[in-house]
Image: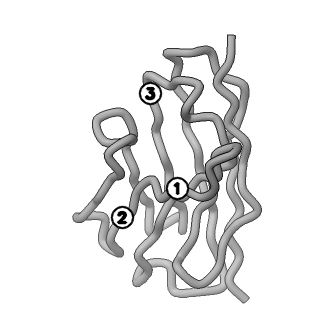
Amino acid sequence: QDQLVESGGDLVQPGGTARLSCRCSGFTFSMAWMHWVRQVPGKGFEWVAVISPDGSTKYYSDSSKGRFAISRDNAENTINLEMRNLGSVDTGVYYCTNEDYWGQGTQVTVSS
């Protein structure tokens, strides 16, 4: 069974940075498009970014473009999300997904 385990969520100061990771197993990671999706309080789920199987193609939501960077390490079956210039609007639970399965999420709280 596919397993995705996120980590790296934390309390972050406004304007700060955070790095999320998602370790995957149980499927052919190197052939999977991988996404980050977040659940924002009171606003539901919001897609954040996606990366192609070889890492050469990346797309971002308008809200994450220019501030977030998605990457992957196919040798480690891991994807990452580097986030900078964080604001309160970025507070939420961040999930990775391979379009079939989701991880349990990791909480990012942006607050002073």
User: In terms of secondary structure, where does tag 2 sit?
Assistant: strand
Q: Residue 99, position in %: x, y?
A: 52, 79
Per the model, the C-alpha gap separating discs 3 and 1 is 18 Å
Numbered label attached to residue 46: 1
Task: Name the residue type under label 2.
Answer: Ile
Residues under numbered marks 1 and 2 in contact, where contact means CB atoms less than 8 Å apart: no
- Residue 31 is left or right of residue 107, and the answer is left
User: In terms of secondary structure, where does tag 1 sit?
Assistant: strand
Mark sitting earlier along the chain (2/3): 2
Q: Residue 110, position in %: x, y?
A: 64, 24
* Residue at the far top in the pictured view: 112
Mark sitting earlier along the chain (3/1): 1
In the image, residue 27 above or below residue 5 = below
Quadrant of res 2: bottom right
Determine which residue is flagged by label 2. 51
Task: Name the residue type under label 1.
Answer: Glu
Q: Residue 37, position in %: x, y?
A: 54, 58
Q: Residues within 10 Å of mark 3 (few under 14, many from 20)?
A: some
Per the model, the C-alpha gap separating discs 2 and 3 is 18 Å
Residues under numbered marks 3 and 1 in contact, where contact means CB atoms less than 8 Å apart: no
Q: Which residue occupies 39% across, 39% down?
A: 68
User: In terms of secondary structure, where does tag 3 sit?
Assistant: loop
Per the model, the C-alpha gap separating discs 1 and 2 is 16 Å
In the image, residue 82 above or below residue 77 = above
